[in-house]
Image (cartoon, rainbow, N blue to C red):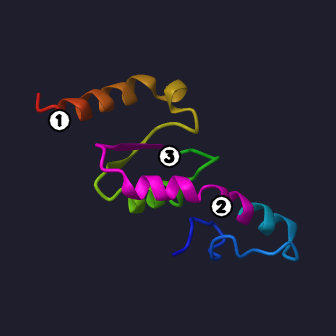
Amino acid sequence: MRAFCPIRHRACSHGPGRAGYRWTKARAACRFEWLERELRESKLPTLLVWGREDEVFDHATFATRFKELLPHAEGPLLVTGRHFLQEDSGEEIAGEINHFLDRIEGR
């Protein structure tokens, strides 16, 4: 099983002889193996909300991966905003979260 790695190598199989950029990204991916493991096991109700303009974690890569790890999750819901959605789209997100909570609580 592969850990999530943007350069798609096997988990922790990256050697220091690789190009510095690729090596750094691979080491970072290996650090998140625990997160992937926990997310795969989670059955908690989940709403994935992502900023369309997120320059840190682009939705095409990361929101898609979170959906793979949490197939029961609703979303990903793409909203206007960058990485700090609570600042860019606070009211929109609050409304979506309230609707989500109403649905899971049967209101």
Where residue 12 appears, as percent x and y from the top left, is 69, 70
Q: Is residue 11 above or below residue 99?
A: below
Secondary structure beneath dot 3 equals loop
- Res 101 quadrant in image: top left
Q: Is residue 41 above or below residue 49?
A: below
Where residue 98 appears, as percent x and y from the top left, is 27, 27
Mark 1 — residue? 103
The answer to if 52 sits in the magenta stretch is no
- Res 77 quadrant in image: top left
Tag on residue 68? Answer: none
Does the image show residue 59?
no
Q: Residue at x 45, y 60 (%)?
A: 64
Where residue 52 appears, as percent x and y from the top left, is 50, 46
> Which segment is the magenta one?
26-51
Task: Depth check: give the residue in front, 71 or 34.
Answer: 34
Mark 3 — residue? 52
